[in-house]
């Protein structure tokens, strides 16, 4: 019975590890998206200010 319990624990550990890896990957992807989006907004407003100063 202990051999079966060890197999269950091994499977559980593997599944938990896979979930942790997936979560970490998704967090990194979300952070990269967030940073890219914010940078695009900053670039957009810099360009608007530049264009506005050229018009005035």
Image (tube, rainbow, N blue to C red):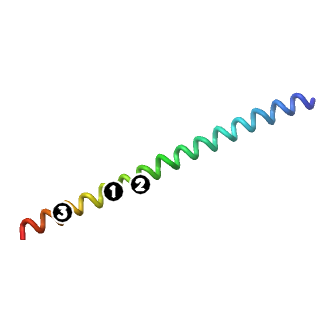
Q: Answer above or below: position of 27 versus 47.
A: above
- Residue at 46 percent across and 52 percent down: it is 31
**Depicted 24 relative to depicted 47: above or below:** above
Q: Residues within 10 Å of mark 2 (few under 14, many from 20)?
A: few
**Helix, strand or loop at disc 3?**
helix
Residue 54's tag is none
Q: Secondary structure at mark 1?
A: helix
Q: Work out which quarter of the rendered image holds the N terminus and state it.
A: top right
Q: Which mark is residue 34?
A: 2
Lateral position of residue 54 relative to residue 9, left or right: left
Do residues under tags 3 and 1 come within 8 Å of each other at their CB atoms?
no
Q: Which mark is residue 48?
A: 3
Residue occupied by mark 1: 39
Q: How many marks?
A: 3
Q: Quadrant of residue 34?
A: bottom left
Distance from disc 1 to disc 2, alpha carbons, whole Å, reads: 9 Å
The answer to whether the residues at label 2 and label 3 have Cβ atoms under 8 Å apart is no
Name the image quarter holding residue 49.
bottom left
Q: Earlier in the sequence, mark 1 or mark 2?
A: 2
Q: Could you tell which of marks 3 and 1 lies nearer the N-terminus?
A: 1
* In front of the other: 36 or 1: 36
Residue 47 locus on image (x, y percent): 19, 60
Instruction: Say few, some or many: other residues with alpha carbon within 10 Å of mark 3 (under 14 / 14 to 19 / 20 or more).
Output: few
- Measuring from the top left, give residue 56's x and y in whole percent: 6, 71
Q: Position of residue 45 (x, y in %)?
A: 24, 63
Left or right relative to 50: residue 39: right
Identity of the residue drawn at 71% across and 35% down:
14
Q: Residues within 10 Å of mark 1 (few under 14, many from 20)?
A: few
Residue 28: % across, % down:
50, 48
Q: Residue at x 43, y 50 (%)?
A: 32
Q: Nearer the viewer, mark 1 or mark 2?
A: 1
């Amino acid at each position: 019975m202990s051999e079966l319990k060890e197999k269950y624990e091994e499977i559980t550990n593997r599944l938990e590890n896979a979930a942790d890896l997936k979560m970490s990957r998704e967090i990194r992807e979300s952070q990269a998206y967030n940073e890219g989006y914010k940078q695009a907004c900053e670039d957009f407003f810099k360009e608007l200010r530049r264009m506005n100063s050229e018009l005035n």
